[in-house]
Amino acid sequence: MRLAIHTLGTRGDVQPYVALTRGLQEAGYEVILAPAARFETFVTAQDISFWPLPDDFLDLMDTLAGRAALSRRNTLTWTLRRLVREVRPMMRRLLNAQWAAAQGAAAIIYHPKALGSVHLAERLDIPAFLAFILPGMTPTRAFPNPMLPFANHGLFDRLSHELFLRYANGLYRNQSIGVTVAIMSAVNDPEMHRRATELGARIREEDGVGRAVELINRGLVRLPVSAKSRS
């Protein structure tokens, strides 16, 4: 069975998916990994099939406008006006490349930065599996959402994730620079760093790749025979 993994970002957004790809290969799957084109040598050196996604967004972050967006030297409105002319054609190129990379796959596994993965899978009538490398996108009782100032509260841990996911969309839709500043302040908070360190130590003790392969296996077992036969 062939699987397509789509990810977009820097090396930190690619290397974990190299490990996941190796784990899936060992489990008997044929996997094609689609990150930004600049990572071709890194990926193929691991004996992994590679499909290039455009480097456009990474290149944009190296421009003056991109650096201004990251540093918040200008208002969000100014940044959006400056970038929108460049981002629209970039999005079309990205979606075209992702569409090509997904052909023949029985499922798409994706990083949330790989925009369009869910919609492409829907169009191809195949499942899509979110495989995010950071906690917070999937509610869990194991620990509270790291973006909220909550200590461990047992039954309330899962609720903290659900609250964050429910209200984060509204915050981002408002395009508020105040929200951006608040998030950056939280990320730079010493207590946040302490909690992140503790959580990171717990995660490192786990077999993350093995667990991910197990969960993907479970999802694929439920596929109809016609989907399983795709290659």
Image (cartoon, rainbow, N blue to C red):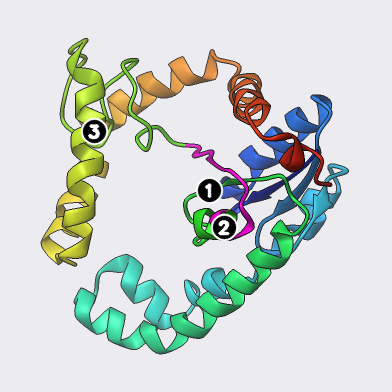
Q: Secondary structure at mark 2?
A: loop
Q: Which residues are magenta?
A: 122-133
The residue sitting at the left extreme is 178
Toward which corner of the image does residue 30 lie, by quadrant?
top right
Nearer-N-terminus badge (2/3): 2
Q: Picture quarter containing residue 84?
A: bottom left
Residue density around tag 2, few if under 14, some if 14–19, many if 20 or more, within 10 Å: many
- Assign the N terminus to one quadrant of the image: top right
Which numbered mark, 1 or 3, is in the foreground of this view?
3
> Does residue 185 appear in this view?
no
Q: Residue at x 33, y 87 (%)?
A: 82
| Percent position of residue 153, x then y | 17, 13
| Residue type (three-letter) at the residue carrying disc 1 | His
Name the residue: 66% across, 66% down: 99
Decide if residue 38 is on the left or right side of residue 166: right
Q: Mark 1 Cα within 10 Å, few/some/many (few <14, many 20+)?
A: many
In this figure, which residue is indicated by the disc labeled 3?
A: 162
- Name the residue beneath numbered marker 1: 111
Other residues around mark 3 within 10 Å, as few (<14) / some (14–19) / many (≥20): some
Q: Is residue 68 above or below residue 78?
A: above
Mark identifier at residue 8: 2
Q: Is residue 70 left or right of residue 23?
A: left
Is mark 2 in CB contact (under 8 Å) with mark 1? yes
